[in-house]
Amino acid sequence: MTSKKGFTLLEVLIAMLILSAGILLLSNSWSGTFVRIRKTQLNQEITALLERKAAELDLEYHGKPIDTIPEEREDDFGSEYEHYKWKMTSRAFESPNLASIMTSKEGGANEMLLMLINQLTDQLTKTIKEVKVTVIYTGGKKPLEYSVVMYYVDYDKPLSIGGAAAPAAPSQ
């Protein structure tokens, strides 16, 4: 009786199936890792560009009257970052209506307090400007936008008390 040592066709096919399943799982794992690494790099680039542009605009408008800040601006980052662009929008600060919080059904707030709150709200609206800076990545299937909002205060704007302008505090 002779003993033949070797594998049957069925054993070879099962081994090939197990091997191919392992290779498929490994390649999916690697491709998922590469996608996550690319997304992380993209987020890092967008965040760095957003921080850079916000700092540039802060240097440009810091200490200047808020009336000099334009309503809109936009541009790109040059050929070094060809898939990125930025835009800036600004608007007057919208303060919540504090007078409505102070009034109640039981009797309300006194008129002098309401007048002071309304003047404060009006003054905040005149001296604060909201600036939103957005970086847009256009290299993917759909654009990605990351934004930051900054608030500029015009400390040199005179206070208006009871409809009359009060003298501005000396700047240092």
Image: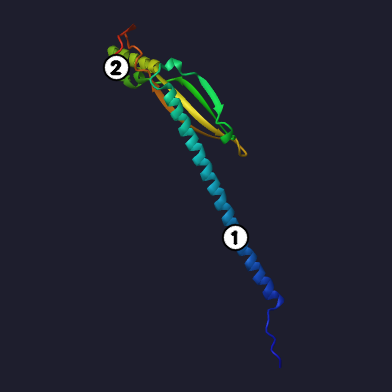
Is residue 122 positioned above or below 56 on the image?
above
In the rendered structure, the answer to whether residue 42 lies left or right of residue 1 reads left
Q: Residue furthest top?
A: 164
Dividing the picture into quadrants, the one containing residue 123 is top left
Image location of residue 127, percent across then percent down: 38, 17
- Residue at the image position 60 percent from the left and 58 percent from the top: 27
Q: Quick check: can you spot residue 69?
A: yes
Q: Which mark is residue 135?
A: none
Is residue 82 positioned above or below 157 on the image?
below
Image location of residue 152, percent across then percent down: 40, 22
Is residue 27 positioned above or below 144 on the image?
below
* CA distance for labels 1 and 2: 69 Å
Image location of residue 13, percent across then percent down: 69, 71
Q: Which amino acid does label 1 sit on?
A: Leu
Mark 1 residue element? helix
In the image, 133 versus 95, the foreground residue is 133
Label 1 packing within 10 angstroms: few (<14), some (14-19), many (20+): few
In the rendered structure, the answer to whether residue 55 lies left or right of residue 30 reads left
* Contact between labelled residues 2 and 1, with CB atoms less than 8 Å apart: no
Color style of the picture? rainbow
Q: State the residue position of label 1.
A: 25
- Residue at the image position 55 percent from the left and 33 percent from the top: 136
- Residue at the image position 40 percent from the left and 22 percent from the top: 62
Q: State the residue position of label 2.
A: 109
Q: Dividing the image into 4 quarters, which one contains the C terminus? A: top left
- Residue at the image position 52 percent from the left and 44 percent from the top: 41
Mark 2 residue element? loop
